[in-house]
């Protein structure tokens, strides 16, 4: 019997890992669809490539930093170059657990790259993929999931609203500040332009792939299948996503007078991001509420960054940042005594402000760490690499050609080139 | 006199004609007539005298006597004789006219509604055929053309052909009232400018961020619905204000439209007062930055916009009611 449970747990974890890795596909569609044709191939290619790179870094040091023994304040210091050994007393395959965790590290990195979109050099992606996977993600993950000081405080972050999403978003924030807005995003008089994505269907498909992948992300985070608890986690996850989409539609209709599709898509994602921390700790009605609030929050957050003249091409700051913060705080409000296996019940369940305080402190410190370290690293890269950004000419012709010498949509562009040649 | 000196004269004079929409439009009329005579003179020098009777008319905001400071050109020609010779003559005159107007400061019409386009420059016989086709065809394009033509106002020549054509439309509509419903559908989409919370819905991006689109959200509901009611009642007038006045004098509309005229007059005044004074661009003229309005003016503007929606609903019920009974 124990063997069967062990095997089932391991299958469940690997299935989770597969779903989360598939979310990279969701991000490719989401990011490529939300940006222009001339960068589509680059976006798709760099996602695959940086995930590969992050995998190797995670194997070499990332995993050890997060979960290793002999830990100091920041990181653990064993299990480098993980050999695939089974850890004693684990109720599932350690290698499967490793794969699951690796997939998460990859998602956080891809979120961070949202802040790079359409203007960063390929070499900047390469270097930052390594630095982020070594120095940013593992520290926050260790603090909260690897038995670090925030774990000891009883911080609740079931599947990573803070660890994965907010950490990625903070790096994206640092990057977009240092990279500056894309050419043509803001006008001299302070108004901003809409740089439309080239394929709304891609973007929507991306959201659906992510939505499905999220069942691995959150459901898989139960690690074990014993009592079928993952079903409840999946239920909460789905409810929040739905509520986020509905809320976003309502708010965009009320404020803009139209049912804005990018807003609806962001709303679904924001609901998912927010419920990630709380999916295992709250009742279903709270999941609906958490998603609903996230859908409204993301709408105003997008407006807020636009007003600050911060160019956030694929809304990473709002979807993963603002909603990540809200999601982390939400368990401090709604965690029930029965479900709060980590930490205490929330404010509305007689827990007082103590859990909310833990959540607020944890989310602030983690955000601050991720932002400051990312900013310092990127700033140093900017100095050493003589800029993070491609030249103006390269940005205008597009990164497909400037960084890869190839078009994502060859027919569309090469036909034009030929026409120009003939015309000349 | 070359066009350049006309332009100079216009640039010097037009500041004096900005007090009211009435004054501005009288000035536009004068200006366009001057351009016509210069163009005609030039054309006669090259191609000889005018071969037959003709009428030159303007449409769009010009036809409705409600042009903004900057306005693109919409115009057409009707002439007496149908022949290859007259066709050539008037088309090249139309071309000269369009170039002249453009040079003087009336940009070419994007939709090619100009006398240089064979669609808008025809003998009266061909015009009648074309109009009948538009009336029966009910395609998206013919509906659009029909609505454009319905605002035609003669600037040069006697107003006989144009009247005749308008009568053709009125007679057809009387016999086929369902056409009005089809026309209604064509103009039903209005860009919302006042939202759920009674807030302004301004442009969120681009160079007009913070402004409302006065043309689409403000003028269109009034212009389109008043035009439709005018068509229903076989009115001769082409200006929205005059149409409103005539409708208002009919007892069945008195109660429901009494607020309308004042609102539309205010709309014209706001556009005149708050247009972007630094621009020479036709597109810019229709945007109103609500930050420039005082608190009372904002309230007023919201009222005007909401009443536009109200007029839209009212017209809908009038036309639908007419079909049903």
Image (cartoon, rainbow, N blue to C red):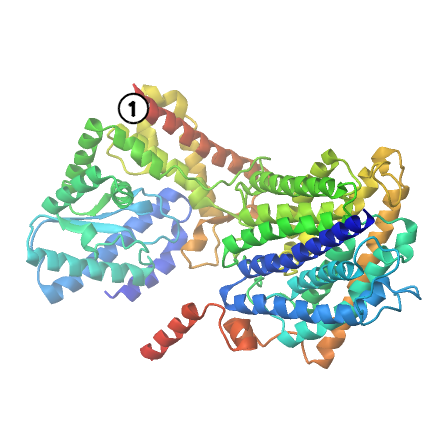
Q: Quadrant of residue A31?
A: bottom right
Total tally of numbered discs in the picture = 1
Query: In this picture, is A418 found above or below B146?
Result: below
Name the one closer to the observer, B246 or A370: A370
Q: Position of residue B91 (x, y in %)?
A: 16, 58
Name the one closer to the observer, A234 or B175: A234
Quarter of the image where the C terminus of chain B is located: top left
Q: Position of residue B160 (x, y in %)?
A: 14, 40
Q: Quadrant of residue B258?
A: top left
Quarter of the image where the N terminus of chain B is located: bottom left
Query: In this picture, is B194 found above or below A184?
Result: above
Q: Position of residue A148 (x, y in %)?
A: 89, 58
Judging by the rendered image, the residue that carries numbered circle 1 is B323
Label 1 lies in what chain? B
Viewer can see residue A372: no
Q: Quadrant of residue A349?
A: top right
Q: Position of residue A96 (x, y in %)?
A: 75, 59
Q: Residue at x 79, y 72 (%)?
A: A60
Query: In the structure shown, which secondary structural element does the residue marked by tag 1 occupy?
Result: helix
Viewer can see residue B20: yes
Q: Residue at x 26, y 27 (%)?
A: B233
Name the one closer to the observer, A193 or A370: A370
| Residue A23 falls left or right of residue B316 | right
| Residue B18 falls left or right of residue B150 | right
**Label 1: few (<14), some or many (≥20) within 10 Å?**
some
């Amino acid at each position: 019997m124990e063997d069967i449970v062990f095997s089932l747990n391991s299958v469940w974890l690997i299935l989770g890992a597969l779903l989360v890795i598939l979310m990279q596909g969701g991000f490719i569609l989401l990011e490529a669809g939300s940006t222009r044709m001339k960068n589509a191939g680059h976006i798709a290619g760099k996602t695959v490539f940086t995930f590969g790179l992050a995998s190797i870094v995670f194997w070499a040091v990332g995993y050890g930093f997060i979960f290793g023994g002999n830990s100091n304040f920041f990181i653990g210091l064993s299990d480098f170059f993980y050999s695939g050994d089974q850890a004693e007393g684990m109720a599932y395959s350690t290698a499967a657990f490793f794969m699951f965790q690796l997939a998460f590290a990859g998602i956080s990195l891809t979120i961070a790259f949202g802040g790079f979109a359409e203007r960063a050099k390929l070499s900047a992606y390469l270097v930052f993929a390594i630095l982020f996977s070594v120095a940013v993600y593992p520290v926050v993950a260790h603090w909260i999931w690897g038995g670090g000081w925030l774990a000891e405080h009883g911080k609740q972050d079931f599947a990573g609203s803070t660890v994965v999403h907010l950490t990625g978003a903070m790096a994206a924030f640092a990057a977009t500040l240092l990279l500056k807005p894309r050419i043509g995003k803001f006008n001299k008089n302070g108004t901003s332009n809409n740089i439309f994505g080239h394929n709304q269907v891609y973007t929507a498909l991306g959201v659906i792939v992510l939505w499905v992948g999220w069942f691995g992300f959150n459901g898989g985070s139960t690690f074990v299948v014993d009592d079928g608890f993952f079903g409840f986690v999946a239920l909460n996850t789905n409810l929040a996503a739905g509520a986020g989409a509905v809320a976003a539609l309502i708010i965009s209709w009320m404020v803009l007078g139209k049912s804005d599709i990018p807003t609806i898509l962001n709303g679904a994602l924001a609901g998912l991001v927010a419920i990630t921390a709380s999916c295992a700790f709250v009742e279903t009605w709270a999941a609906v509420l958490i998603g609903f609030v996230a859908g409204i929050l993301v709408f105003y957050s997008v407006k807020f960054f636009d007003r600050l003249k911060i160019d956030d091409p694929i809304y990473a700051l709002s979807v993963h940042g603002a909603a990540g913060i809200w999601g982390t705080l939400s368990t401090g409000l709604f965690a029930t005594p029965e479900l709060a296996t980590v930490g205490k019940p929330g404010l509305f369940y007689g827990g007082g402000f103590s859990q909310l305080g833990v959540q607020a402190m944890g989310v602030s410190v983690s955000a601050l760490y991720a932002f400051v370290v990312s900013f310092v690293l990127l700033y140093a890269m900017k100095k050493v690499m003589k800029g993070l950004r491609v030249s103006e000419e390269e940005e205008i012709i597009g990164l497909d050609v400037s960084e890869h010498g190839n078009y994502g949509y060859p027919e569309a562009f090469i036909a034009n080139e030929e026409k120009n040649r003939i015309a000349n | 006199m070359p066009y350049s000196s006309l332009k100079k004269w216009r640039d010097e004079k037009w500041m004096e004609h900005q007090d009211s929409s009435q004054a501005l439009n009288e000035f536009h009329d004068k200006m366009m007539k001057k351009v016509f005579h210069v163009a005609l003179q030039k054309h006669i020098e090259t191609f000889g005298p005018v071969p037959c009777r003709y009428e030159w008319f303007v449409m769009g905001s010009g036809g409705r006597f409600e042009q903004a400071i900057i306005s693109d050109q919409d115009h057409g020609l009707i002439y007496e004789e149908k022949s290859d010779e007259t066709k050539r003559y008037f088309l090249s005159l139309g071309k000269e006219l369009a170039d002249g107007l453009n040079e003087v400061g009336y940009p070419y019409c994007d939709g090619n509604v100009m006398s240089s386009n064979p669609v808008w420059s025809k003998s009266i016989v061909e015009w009648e055929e074309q109009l009948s086709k538009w009336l029966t065809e009910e395609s998206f394009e013919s509906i659009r053309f029909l609505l454009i033509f319905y605002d035609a106002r003669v600037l040069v020549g006697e107003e006989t052909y144009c009247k005749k054509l308008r009568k053709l439309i009125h007679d057809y509509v009387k016999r086929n009232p369902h056409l009005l419903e089809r026309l209604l559908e064509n103009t039903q989409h209005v860009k919302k400018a006042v939202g759920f919370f009674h807030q302004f819905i301004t442009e969120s991006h681009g160079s007009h961020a913070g402004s409302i689109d006065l043309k689409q959200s403000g003028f269109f509901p009034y212009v389109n619905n008043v035009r439709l009611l005018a068509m229903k009642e076989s009115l001769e007038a082409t200006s929205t204000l005059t149409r409103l006045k005539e409708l208002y004098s009919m007892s069945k509309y008195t109660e429901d439209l009494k607020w309308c005229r004042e609102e539309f007059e205010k709309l014209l005044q706001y556009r005149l007062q708050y247009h972007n004074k630094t621009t020479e661009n036709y597109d810019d003229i229709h945007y109103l930055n609500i930050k420039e309005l005082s608190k009372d003016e904002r309230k007023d503007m919201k009222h005007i916009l909401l009443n536009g929606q109200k007029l839209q609903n009212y017209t809908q019920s009038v036309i639908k009611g007419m079909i049903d009974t």
